[in-house]
Amino acid sequence: MALTGNNDSCDDLLQETVERALTRIEQWQEGTSLESWMFRIAQNLHIDAVRKGARRGQKVDIDELAGLSGEDGRTIVETRSELAHAQKAMAALPDEQRIVLALVVIDGRSYKEVADILDLPMGTVMSRVSRARQAIDLYLNGKAA
């Protein structure tokens, strides 16, 4: 969910990742982290999907709208507006910051787990998360566009 933001897209990405890994298993090198290799495949597939989606425009899932009946329209609009603003803030981050922030904050992984998955020093993960949090704070408080 760290990359996609919703369950359906996450399931699709997982399926595509496994398919890609199985068809290219000969590219995995023994002694390297299988989890890191699989995450890199998922990351690349997600980036491709985002680029493809940006050319077509964003879709709205009709099932998401079904649960809105009976709720206060103003609250829904405000909540959606805040969520859209937060998503824009996250999307504005450089990939390396967005990915580590999502893995730590959204997926709840430890800095060490993220460092192992991405094959990075833990200090690098910590500094990227810190910079990402600062950038999001600036964005959400109107100090950055």
Image: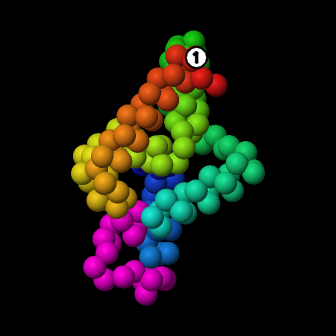
Task: List the single residue furthest toward the right.
Answer: 55
Above or below, 105 relative to 2: above
Secondary element at tag 1: loop
Identify the residue position indicated by label 1 in the image.
142
Above or below, 74 relative to 2: above
Residue 23, position as x, y percentages in the image: 49, 83
Q: In the image, what residue occupies the spot 54% across and 39% down? A: 93
Residue 134, position as x, y percentages in the image: 44, 27
Q: Residues within 10 Å of mark 1 (few under 14, many from 20)?
A: few
Our reading of the magenta stretch's main secondary structure is helix
Task: List the single residue furthest toward the bottom.
Answer: 26
Residue 97, position as x, y percentages in the image: 46, 43
Magenta stretch in the rendered image: 22-39
Looking at the figure, which quarter contains the C terminus? top right
The color scheme shown is: rainbow
Q: Inspect this view and state whether residue 133 appears.
A: yes
Give the quadrant of residue 62. Answer: top right
Asked if residue 29 lies in the magenta stretch, the reply is yes
Q: Inspect this view and state whether residue 68 appears.
A: no
Residue 28, position as x, y percentages in the image: 40, 80
Q: In the image, what residue occupies the spot 31% across and 83% down? A: 30
Q: In the image, what residue occupies the spot 58% across and 56% down? A: 47
Asked if residue 109 lies in the magenta stretch, the reply is no
Above or below, 107 relative to 69: below
